[in-house]
């Protein structure tokens, strides 16, 4: 149980800000009649829904009330990969939907060759700046696509898991040519496998050009081996730290052996296959920018975690991924990380143990592990007062938008992207390969809470540019968001403490009321 005194002290800066925003006038908003409160969602069910999704909206609340947790979860796990029509239409309008990574690289190569022929230095510099701007715009469009799905997709669990895995298998858009492969990385490697078998997900990342470029494996070859990716594949992606809580016990020799296995996995920047003899040509693999080049592979025998790997080329990679994915340490590491992200910074060990057993029994079925976690008896008991799961910036911003605008599509996502940047969690912007942290301690500083307050005020005080074009000109007129709807009184109000209720009661306008709610301590938690 959390000691309430230090917990309360942590929120003092935020509560002081809330006090400065309230007026002495009585709240102008009137609760619905008692008849409107029939069929309200319990606090436990609301927290469950806020865990399965990025944040409850009216439609999801009503559906959970109608079908219950178990059926709701099954529907989420079986939700089609294809986007719903409104989301699909919005994504199709983005430039990121045109072409693939190989085509983008070819365009960039051609433009660089043209730039190199220019003799005017000013013209050359302007052309380079334009090319760099195109790269930044590509990342921006990838962010828009990600946010459109997070905000509006009915398959909220898949989109949450896409966000989770993009952090687990993190790449940094600002390194080298990663940005050119980034859209395909999320679209083809991460999202389709987000609820499937863990081994398939790992294989998809191992053969993803964005990952191979980011962790330097594209430059790794026999007699010129780079161990960077091999180390992170074991420590961050599968087994966990050697000697750590997952129980993994690999050695530096294992890292070196895995690095040898991974030689030859790289990025085809030539646009055509390498010159290979007949025997090696039969071993060559390629898919878009990805290639396995046997001329760069170490064909010597290898031993990984005590298991022999025979020299077969790309088959060695598949064998190594299977060994890593089925290791008991991986089951423990992934189960604990999922429970820590979704449930609590210190999740019940009994729940994690059952998740681990499910992972092992189902050969790493991610959906089955999530089912074990979300339907466990410990889920509701894992959040004593003051110990609910703190929202990272992504969840805070998206859940606030889902409540405030409740499915109304915005036309300009730049403000949302800027808010995430201000909160220190820009999409694809984490330089180190460990991804953004999930623990409350990373996001609950006084400075972070002050910035969240300002963002809550921006969301609650009006459109905030969300219904404008990129040029800032309004495309639609929208009034203030009104989250104090029936959903608020049916679901959220009962989760608020006396201080927040008092602040809401003192709000003198809809804008002030919105700001108080969206920056309250309770709203900062799932």
Image: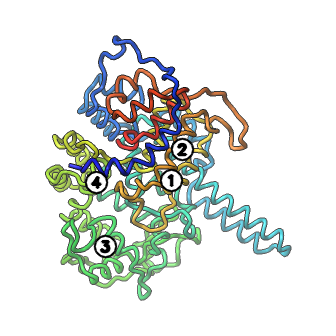
User: Extreme bottom residue here?
Assistant: 223
Q: Which residue does the numbered mark 1 point to in the structure image?
A: 423
- The residue located at (61%, 64%) in the rendering is 105
Query: Are the residues flagged by discs 3 and 1 in contact, CB closer than 8 Å?
Result: no
Callout in the foreground (4, 3): 4
- The residue located at (42%, 81%) in the rendering is 226
Query: Are the residues flagged by discs 4 and 2 in contact, CB closer than 8 Å?
Result: no
Labelled disc at residue 455: 2
Q: Regarding mark 1 in the picture, which secondary structure is present there?
A: loop
Mark 2 or mark 3, earlier in chain: 3
Mark 4 or mark 1, earlier in chain: 4
Distance CA(mark 4)–CA(mark 1): 20 Å
Q: Regarding mark 4 in the picture, which secondary structure is present there?
A: loop
Mark 3 or mark 1, earlier in chain: 3
Quarter of the image holding residue 242?
bottom left
* Front one among 129 and 100: 129
Q: Regarding mark 2 in the picture, which secondary structure is present there?
A: helix
Residue 471, x across and y down, in percent: 73, 43
Distance CA(mark 2)–CA(mark 3): 49 Å
Q: Which residue does the numbered mark 4 point to in the structure image?
A: 345
Callout in the foreground (4, 2): 2
- The residue located at (85%, 73%) in the rendering is 120
Query: Are the residues flagged by discs 4 and 3 in contact, CB closer than 8 Å?
Result: no
Labelled disc at residue 316: 3
Residue 229 in view (yes/no): yes
Callout in the foreground (3, 1): 1
Distance CA(mark 2)–CA(mark 1): 9 Å
- The residue located at (42%, 88%) in the rendering is 223
């Amino acid at each position: 149980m959390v000691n309430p005194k230090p917990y309360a002290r942590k929120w003092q800066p935020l509560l002081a800000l809330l006090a400065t925003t309230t007026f002495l006038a009585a709240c102008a908003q009137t609760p619905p009649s008692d008849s409107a409160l029939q069929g309200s969602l319990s606090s436990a069910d609301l927290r469950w829904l806020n865990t399965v999704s990025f944040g409850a909206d009216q439609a999801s609340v009503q559906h959970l009330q109608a079908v219950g947790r178990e059926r709701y979860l099954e529907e989420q796990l079986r939700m089609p990969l294809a986007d719903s029509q409104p989301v699909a239409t919005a994504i199709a309008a983005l430039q990121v939907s045109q072409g693939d990574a190989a085509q983008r690289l070819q365009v960039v190569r051609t433009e660089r060759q043209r730039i190199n022929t220019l003799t005017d230095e000013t013209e050359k510099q302007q052309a380079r700046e334009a090319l760099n701007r195109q790269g930044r715009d590509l990342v921006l469009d990838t962010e828009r696509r990600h946010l459109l799905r997070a905000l509006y997709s009915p398959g909220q669990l898949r989109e949450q898991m896409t966000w989770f895995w993009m952090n687990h298998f993190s790449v940094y858009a600002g390194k080298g040519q990663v940005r050119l492969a980034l859209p395909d990385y999320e679209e083809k490697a991460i999202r389709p496998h987000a609820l499937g078998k863990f081994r398939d997900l790992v294989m998809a990342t191992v053969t993803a050009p964005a990952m191979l470029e980011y962790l330097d494996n594209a430059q790794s070859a026999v007699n010129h081996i780079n161990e960077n990716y091999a180390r992170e594949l074991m420590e961050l992606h599968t087994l966990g730290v050697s000697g750590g809580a997952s129980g993994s016990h690999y050695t530096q020799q294992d890292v070196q052996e895995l690095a040898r296995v991974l030689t030859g996995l790289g990025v085809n920047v030539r646009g055509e296959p390498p010159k290979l003899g007949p025997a090696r040509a039969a071993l060559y693999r390629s898919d878009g920018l990805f290639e396995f080049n046997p001329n760069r592979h170490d064909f010597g025998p290898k031993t990984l975690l005590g298991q022999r790997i025979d020299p077969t080329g790309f088959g060695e990679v598949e064998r190594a991924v299977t060994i890593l994915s089925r290791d008991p340490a991986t089951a423990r590491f992934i189960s604990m990380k999922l429970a820590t992200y979704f449930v609590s910074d210190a999740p019940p060990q009994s729940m994690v143990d059952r998740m681990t057993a499910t992972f092992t029994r189902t050969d790493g079925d991610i959906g089955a592990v999530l089912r074990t976690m979300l339907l466990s008896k410990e889920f509701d008991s894992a959040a004593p007062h003051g110990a609910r799961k703190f929202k990272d910036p992504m969840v805070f911003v998206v859940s606030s938008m889902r409540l405030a605008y409740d499915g109304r599509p915005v036309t300009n996502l730049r403000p949302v992207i800027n808010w995430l940047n201000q909160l220190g969690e820009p999409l694809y912007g984490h330089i180190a390969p460990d991804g953004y942290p999930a623990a409350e301690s990373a996001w609950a500083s006084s400075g972070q809470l002050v910035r969240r307050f300002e963002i809550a005020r921006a969301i609650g005080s009006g459109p905030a540019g969300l219904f404008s074009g990129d040029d800032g000109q309004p495309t639609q007129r929208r009034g203030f968001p009104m989250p104090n709807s029936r959903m608020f009184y049916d679901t959220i109000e009962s989760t608020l403490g006396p201080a927040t209720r008092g602040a809401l009661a003192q709000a003198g306008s809809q804008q002030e009321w919105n700001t108080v709610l969206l920056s309250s301590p309770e709203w900062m938690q799932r």
